[in-house]
Image: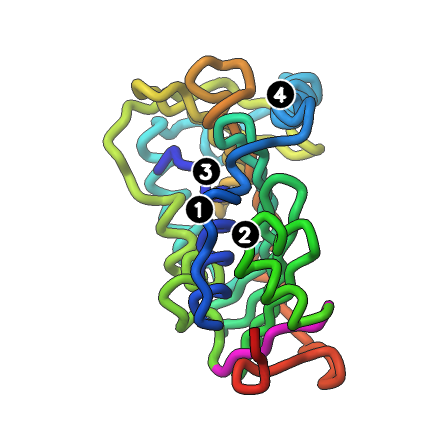
Amino acid sequence: MKRTVLATALMCTTAAVVLTGCGGKKDAASSPAASAPAGAATATTATTATTTTAAKAAAGAGPLDGLTAQQISDKTVADMNALTSVHVVGQEMDGDTPAHLDVTVATSGKCLATVGEGGGDMKVISTTEYTYMKGDSTFWKAQGKDGVALGTALHGRWLKKPGKAASDPDLKEFCDLKTFMAGFTADNGAPLTKGAAVELGGQRVIPLTQHDSDGDLVVYVADTAKPYAVKFDEPGKDGAGTDGSGTITFSGFDKPLHVYAPPPSQTVTEDALTV
């Protein structure tokens, strides 16, 4: 399985498509990567510590006990790629800057997402006909002068674009389920180690540790007939919860996704928008 945690890249993708779609260009001198809130580097470390404390030895045997690490990984990849919907929550440190992601996505093309970095958030709602995007003031300010202008023009409303996000070459990275899952299930050839079963959130899981030069990645796999990955835990290259560290959880497997467009009074189309 691929080791990369995607939250930071997804935030940048969303910012780019919004600004580009409205004819603006990001002011590089005002990049959100330039600064971060004090204490931001402790967020992922705390999450990892909580996981370690919560995980305890699980008694009995499960469907994955007799399988090797690679066999479990292969089954997990197959089942994750066959999902019709999933809810994913993640956070990552990009240098000293925290990034986060909360997305629910389905093969229908429907998508609900919040992505952010450095204290700012961008929300995405995608139906099968339109995509709606809305950033808060901190997010727009972090995008530079063009971002501020766009945020001012929107005045708290949603930007309405025709077409579902899954068809957008940028937004599909997290609003097209197949593309999204490919980012987690691609095999980079790094060796895997199978750990003893533990209990995570009341569920018996098997930890698979992937080793490479960038540090270890632990994938917790549900010890069930469908061994979905329920958590990715990446302590970062230095193991200290700093640059490159991140945690992602998966839930809501194959659950129906209901998406509702914002009221017309709270939206504005690209054609009607001037910045």
Q: Residue at label 2?
A: 144
| Lower sequence index among marks 1 and 3 | 3
The magenta stretch spans which residues? 156-162
Query: How many numbered dots are placed on residues in this image?
Result: 4
Mark 1 or 4, closer to the camera: 1
Estimate the x, y position of residue 233 in percent, counting from the top left: 52, 28
Q: On the image, which quarter does residue 177 sit in? A: bottom left
What secondary structure do most residues of the magenta stretch adopt? strand
| Residue 259 in the image, given as x and y percentages of width and height | 65, 73
Label 4 sits on what residue type? Answer: Thr
Q: Do labels 3 and 2 touch, CB within 8 Å? A: no
Across and down, in percent, residue 137 comes to 70, 55
Q: In terms of sequence position, does the residue under pointer 1 or pointer 4 come before the other?
A: 1
Of marks 4 and 3, which one's residue comes earlier in the chain?
3
Q: Is 192 situated above or below 141? A: above
Circle 1: element type? helix
- Which residue is label 4 attached to? 45
Vertical arrangement, residue 109 with respect to residue 94, above or below: below
> Spatial distance from mark 3 to mark 2, Cα to Cα?
26 Å
